[in-house]
Image (spheres, grey):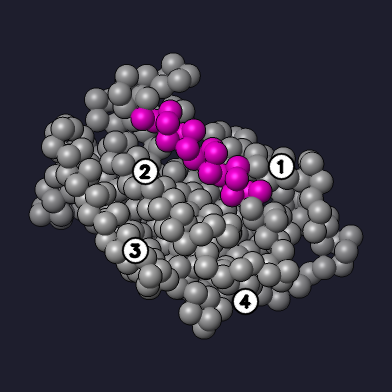
């Protein structure tokens, strides 16, 4: 398929549109969804409605609108958020079935994502060294950075897109040696990036993703295992040197993880999780209503005198339980299971381990049950989360070739 200049320009700009501004991301999502619905109507192409994961998304939305919202602490607000939730699955469907439906489109998108990610990484590194980034934005604190985002969430945001960027390993048909070298380099840059941001959860999830990706690379490159072992050894030495020379960052990003886990129940995360569980118990089956957790938490006085605020539970599944009840949580998990199945079943059947590993990681860094952090229902984060969903669904139909396999006409 021949791409027009506006099309490939749009695909290159899409990562930046979703990353740099909450408002711009939301406008972009709405425009993509409206264009996709118009295209589907014009071509009478509604096949995407038959996909199991999307039908479950519709069922989840119906539950939120017809059962959860009427019994909410704020029925009108919950209903509006329930209806607007559907824009996220629609965005993912638009990516999978239209915007990123061909290899050429995927390549142009990845070009934009790689350039954007490396520029953001360079900006964050500059802020780490000099205390201010290229745009004059100061670091949030001595051990927390903002990068170009003005908020201390650069690791949280970049975590959602970095493993998508590593798909370049499979999209372009480089030699096995160059592909492995480039993949390890990009992965290690991401690891250092998570380390210097001072965001513990982002570093933990990114590192866990590496534990899935690296064995897949070991399996995919049997003739290059010596090179892979050497690369891992070299990266380990550089990481240890970095930790030794940056004690303040090491204390924040690495050592404090052990402290948190050793006394988790009394830590801020443990108390916030316990508070969310307490809110959930007030309406176990239906929840307090979508987007009402702060109100429910404050009404119960969960954190009275503890110095904690009722912003959000810092855990997706506790948030779903507290706001949508067990019924809503089960429906969401069923939808998520269908997404995982569609993204992984063909790559696994065809033993495309690197493809399967990357798709699994792209989804799991956002949906891992034990993770904590910014709500994935927040517009900014959700845009990147559902970008990942759309990407893994887009590349799932035809498992991506290994670098050693010639790309055929079917890959275009």
Q: Position of residue 234 (x, y in %)?
A: 24, 49
* Mark 1–mark 4 CB contact (< 8 Å): no
Considering depth in this image, is 101 or 139 the residue closer to the camera? 101
Which circle, 2 or 1, is nearer the viewer? 2
CA separation in Å, label 2 and label 3: 15 Å
Mark 3 or mark 4: whose residue is earlier in sequence: 4
Which numbered dot is residue 214?
A: 3
* Chief SS of the magenta region: helix
The verdict on residue 357 being magenta is no
How many residues crowd around disc 3 within 10 Å: few (fewer than 14), some, or many (20 or more)?
some
Mark 4 or mark 2: whose residue is earlier in sequence: 4
Q: How many marks?
A: 4
What range is drawn magenta here? 108-125
Left or right of 9: which side holds 362? left
Mark 3 or mark 1: whose residue is earlier in sequence: 1
- Mark 1 secondary-structure assignment: helix
Identify the residue position indicated by label 2 in the image. 189
Left or right of 151: which side holds 336? right
Residue 140 visible in the displayed image: no
* Mark 3–mark 1 CB contact (< 8 Å): no
Q: Residue furthest right?
A: 42
Q: Residue at x 71, y 42 (%)?
A: 10
Q: Position of residue 347 (x, y in %)?
A: 53, 76
CA separation in Å, label 1 and label 4: 29 Å
- Mark 3 secondary-structure assignment: helix
How many residues crowd around disc 4 within 10 Å: few (fewer than 14), some, or many (20 or more)?
some
Considering depth in this image, is 7 or 313 the residue closer to the camera? 7
């Amino acid at each position: 398929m021949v791409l027009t200049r506006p099309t490939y320009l749009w695909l290159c700009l899409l990562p930046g549109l979703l990353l740099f501004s909450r408002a711009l991301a939301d406008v972009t999502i709405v425009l993509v969804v409206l264009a996709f619905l118009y295209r589907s109507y014009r071509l009478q192409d509604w096949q995407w409605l038959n996909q199991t994961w999307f039908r479950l998304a519709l069922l989840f939305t119906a539950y939120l609108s017809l059962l959860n919202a009427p019994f909410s602490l704020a029925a009108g607000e919950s209903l509006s958020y329930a209806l607007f939730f559907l824009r996220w699955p629609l965005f993912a469907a638009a990516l999978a079935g239209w915007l990123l439906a061909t290899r050429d489109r995927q390549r142009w998108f990845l070009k934009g994502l790689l350039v954007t990610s490396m520029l953001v990484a360079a900006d964050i590194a500059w802020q780490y060294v000099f205390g201010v980034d290229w745009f004059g934005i100061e670091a949030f604190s001595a051990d927390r950075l903002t990068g170009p985002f003005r908020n201390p969430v650069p690791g949280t945001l970049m975590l959602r897109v970095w493993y998508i960027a590593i798909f370049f390993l499979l999209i372009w048909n480089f030699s096995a040696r160059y592909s492995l070298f480039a993949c390890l380099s990009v992965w290690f840059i991401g690891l250092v990036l998570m380390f210097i941001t001072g965001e513990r959860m982002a570093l933990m999830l990114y590192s866990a993703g590496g534990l899935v990706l690296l064995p897949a690379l070991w399996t995919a490159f049997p003739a290059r295992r010596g090179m892979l072992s050497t690369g891992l050894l070299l990266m380990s030495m550089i990481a240890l040197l970095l930790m030794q020379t940056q004690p303040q960052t090491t204390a924040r990003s690495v050592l404090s993880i052990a402290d948190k886990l050793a006394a988790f129940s009394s830590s801020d995360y443990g108390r916030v999780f316990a508070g969310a569980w307490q809110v959930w118990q007030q309406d176990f089956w239906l929840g307090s209503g979508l987007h009402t957790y702060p109100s429910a938490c404050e009404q119960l006085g969960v954190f009275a005198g503890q110095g904690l605020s009722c912003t959000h539970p810092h855990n997706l599944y506790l948030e779903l339980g507290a706001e949508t009840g067990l019924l809503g949580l089960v429906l969401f998990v069923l939808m998520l299971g269908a997404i995982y199945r569609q993204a992984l079943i063909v790559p696994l059947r065809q033993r495309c381990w690197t493809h399967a590993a990357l798709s699994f990681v792209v989804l799991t860094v956002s949906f891992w049950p034990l993770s904590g952090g910014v709500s994935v229902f927040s517009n900014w984060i959700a845009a990147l989360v559902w970008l990942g969903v759309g990407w893994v669904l887009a590349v799932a139909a035809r498992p991506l070739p290994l670098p050693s396999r010639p790309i055929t006409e079917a890959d275009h």
